[in-house]
Amino acid sequence: MTDLLPVRDLTFLLFDVFGMDDILSAETFSSHDQQGLVDILEMARQMSLQEFAPIAAALDAEEPTLVDGKVRLHPAAKPALDTFIEAGFLSAPFDEDIGGLQVPFVIHEAITALFGATNTPLLAYAGLTIAAANLLATHGSEALKETWLRPLVEGRFFGTMALSEPQAGSSLADLLTVAVPASDGTYRVRGSKMWITGADQDISENIVHLVLARLPDAPAGTRGISLFLVPKLLPDADGGFTIPNDVAVVGINHKMGFRGAVNTVFSLGDNGGAVGFLVGEPHRGLHAMFHMMNEARIGVGLCAACLSWAGYRHALAYARERPQGRRISERNPLSPPVPIIAHADVRRLLLEQKAISEGALALVMYASLLVDRQRIARESGAEDRAREIGLLLDTLTPIVKAWSSEHGLRASSSAIQVLGGYGYTREYPVERLYRDNRLNPIHEGTNGIQAIDLLGRKILGKGGGAVLLPKLQDVVSRGQAAGGRCAELAEGLAEAVGLLTEVTMSLAGVATSQGPEVLLANATPYLHLVGHTVIAWMWLEQAIIAQAQLAAESPEADFLHGKLQAAQYFFRWELPKTATWAKVLIPVDRTCLDTDPAWL
């Protein structure tokens, strides 16, 4: 029987491939050991299958409703989330002194993968709350943290991030929401926000909105944005939270998928001004919000990876059990049908999904490890090391978000294809997983924005290639030294790295000679080129370990052969696409840039 949620895929990455000895030996995480963390993951797996999975279809079919200005979720949502919170999974990544379990961030992301694979929309409420609490812990004043942080960590309050507005979308420079100082040191916030997940619900005691707005004297553009904490309910004289703030949901956005996570339009200050508290420095709100946005972008990449992973596992189970057709070499029409996994083209579809979803999971886990390693470096006073890790993390973040969501959606589509007509019906989960996954290329900065960020800001602006290239060259050397199939893969990656280096140097010349508009016109194929090269790195890392463990006669032969075969598929079927993307980058193709809008 096929395991729909194999923890082994995660522990293979965490402990076998990337290794966590340095993290678990650090004082920050010294209370944890490998077996204890594996036990936590096993507990998360069981709870996900028992509490989250059974209600996923119902939350999709019965969307949240707006009744008398209040959002009502499916009645099964609260008990499942309460179980998640009571088990300590929401508080897990936070330090013990504020009520957390102080597990490494990468373990928190692995826990998230296990719950997200069964019911990502429900998990979104907890994910936003964790991100809001992290932002507040980093940028909030002591007074704000005293009042608002612990209830978030405890899961009594939920959090949101309120950036977009109806007229602005992703263009945050055009925000119109204003915050006027009041005599008591607070602010009165007025405006309208759009596409806000979880802006109201009937699960938590209170909601903490983190809202971008402008002060009256703010300069134009993104440098004039400040950040405010705007609660749904304000504290009363007795220490409770009972006083309604001037915040109201005015509509629900009815989405193609991800329906269990309510998405809203909400207004602030229709009756005099919503009370808000400044977070961080004036006009530095976007800097603070990027703390939450970058965490959310890794979260989107994880969401895309685990949704495509879940689709793959369902498709694999179906392909093993569904009898249909006969082998091409079988000439007897009366012979029994074979399971469809016996057909090579079905195995092609499964290998595609495995290579994409498990490659994306590897990248997300690696990026999450960098978060932990950067923290450890800072706490040990190794600032140069922390900056180097931070630059690599910054460079990988748009790839985590955009590559995983773009190609993860392709994997989700192939899961439907394996099931054929059944896959296109609601009786099977793969069509829902596809619809849920379709959101990920859009939110937290569309993939086009991520591509521009990668090329313009991270690679050319910050010099991210200087930390990425040595990592790629190192794994090539180790793959060559490993011999066997890994040596072949290493040669393929070496060619891709050479191509990537050539393209990047050429584009640096374009930036100087032709300006930013020409440079960034084809940023998307550049992101795919870099992304495929990075995922090939992730697969070569896995192949090196799998090959070594097979040589040592590991009892997990089928599992390890599966990793090697998926790596080979990626290198032979996917990695050659980098040459096609390079053709529109050297020289920069101007077809899109030179197209007159009237022609379309």
Image: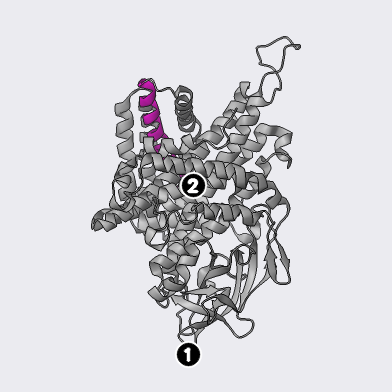
- Residue linked to disc 2: 111
Q: Position of residue 336 (x, y in %)?
A: 72, 14
422 versus 206 height, above or below: above
Q: Quadrant of the N terminus?
A: top right
Mark 2: secondary structure: helix
Farthest residue, direction right: 334
* Residue in view at x 49 percent, y 61 percent: 154
Question: Image quarter for residue 251?
Answer: bottom right
Q: Position of residue 600 (x, y in %)?
A: 65, 56
Q: Quadrant of residue 446?
A: bottom right
Which residue is more in the foreground, 120 or 319?
120
Q: CA distance from mark 2 to mark 1?
A: 45 Å
In primary-sequence order, the first of circles 2 and 1 is 2
Report the span colored magenta: 526-552
Q: Position of residue 125 (x, y in %)?
A: 57, 58
Give the labeled residue for mark 1: 183
Give amino acid for label 2. Answer: Ile
The answer to whether any part of residue 454 appears in the image is yes
